[in-house]
Image (cartoon, rainbow, N blue to C red):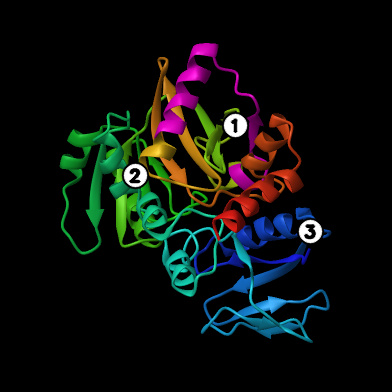
Amino acid sequence: MRKKNIAVVMGGYSTEFEISLQSGQVVCDSLDKNKYNVFPIHILQNEWFYLSEEETKHPINKMDFSFSDGTNTIIPDAVYNTIHGSPGEDGFLQAYLKLLGVPQTSSDFYQAALSFNKRDCLTVLKGFGIQCANSYYINKGVSFSEEEIFKAVGLPCFVKPNRAGSSYGISKAHTLEELLPAIEKAFKEDSEIIIETAIQGVEVSIGVYNNKDEIIVLSPTEIVSENDYFDYEAKYLGKSQEITPARISEKETIDVKIIAKKIYMLLNMKGITRSDFIIQEGIPYFIEINANPGLSSESIIPKQVKESGLTLTEFFDILIENVLIKN
């Protein structure tokens, strides 16, 4: 049987592109080379290309997502999408590949766009009774009142770009004096920002994925940051402990797994996602969902996969087979 051609797309247009390159490399290294021909594809602002083992760049033909391997023209049988941020996590790449008829491993374009927009995602999920922090929204260029923000969310509060990841642009404001600088920092990442009450409790992160029609919830990971919150340093520079399974009660574990699965189903996600919660007084408060969670050596999902008894090779094979079967 012919080996399938799998394009592993990585990079992207956001400040997360370097982390995406790390995630993509993990996938490339882990895929079964007896089963798949693996092609690392870099999607950057100025160029899209296949990077060969000899580090030769072969440009992507955007008409059909084909490229040369140096000898033949390759059209991928499937795309493994590891882009964090735009265009791979906000729906643009998914819509483009859908039009071309090329299957990809992440959620479809509408679901990706919805989950990437924290404001819209929270609004939808609150309508289904999912517990979330109080929030306040600001668009760039629109006047706002610091007193109104304080009345809505209190202090301390988190100030976040509405459409960004990896904790870029996030601040925790403890006083009104810290609020405006935090807002200005967030606006450097996005023209829309979200301000939320800082829920106090145990932070956990939990992966959910589908194996064909079965939805599987991984064990939650407890995040213990050396910093004031789970910021970029804590995520990627070793300034945190990530404990899997989380040191929470059996009831809290069951509850957060049920809610994570419910969110996955409500949003009609597919592939691997990671949802973040803070458990305050036994109640899981939903923070956000990542449609393309990090897969680098420092990331949470690979650790949860290992804890579940799967190798990354087996896990990535499940996600690819999901879309090859449908194709």
User: What is the secondary structure assignment of the residue under circle 2?
Assistant: helix
**Residue behind mark 3:** 35
**Residue behind mark 1:** 218
Q: Nearer the viewer, residue 59 or 164?
A: 59
**Could you tell me which residue is drawn at 34 percent across and 44 percent down?**
178
User: What is the secondary structure assignment of the residue under circle 3?
Assistant: loop
**Residue behind mark 2:** 178
- Going from N to C along the chain, the mark reached first, 2 or 3, is 3
Q: Is residue 49 above or below residue 92?
A: below
Q: Which amino acid does label 3 sit on?
A: Lys
Relative horizontal placement of residue 130, taking residue 308 as reference (left or right): left
Residue 4 position in % (x across, y down)? 72, 65
Relative horizontal placement of residue 121, taking residue 137 as reference (left or right): right
Q: How far apart are marks 3 and 1 (CA)?
A: 26 Å
- Going from N to C along the chain, the mark reached first, 1 or 2, is 2
Q: What residue type is labelled 2?
A: Glu
Q: Nearer the viewer, residue 170 or 77?
A: 77
Asked if residue 14 lies in the magenta stretch, the reply is no
Relative horizontal placement of residue 187, taking residue 304 as reference (left or right): left
Residue 68 seen in the figure: yes
> Which one is in front in this view, the residue at disc 2 or the one at disc 3?
3
Q: How crowded is mark 2: few (under 14 residues within 10 Å), some or many (20 or more)?
A: few
- Going from N to C along the chain, the mark reached first, 3 or 1, is 3
> Which one is in front in this view, the residue at disc 1 or the one at disc 2?
1
The extreme front residue here reads 1
Q: How far apart are marks 2 and 3 (CA)?
A: 54 Å
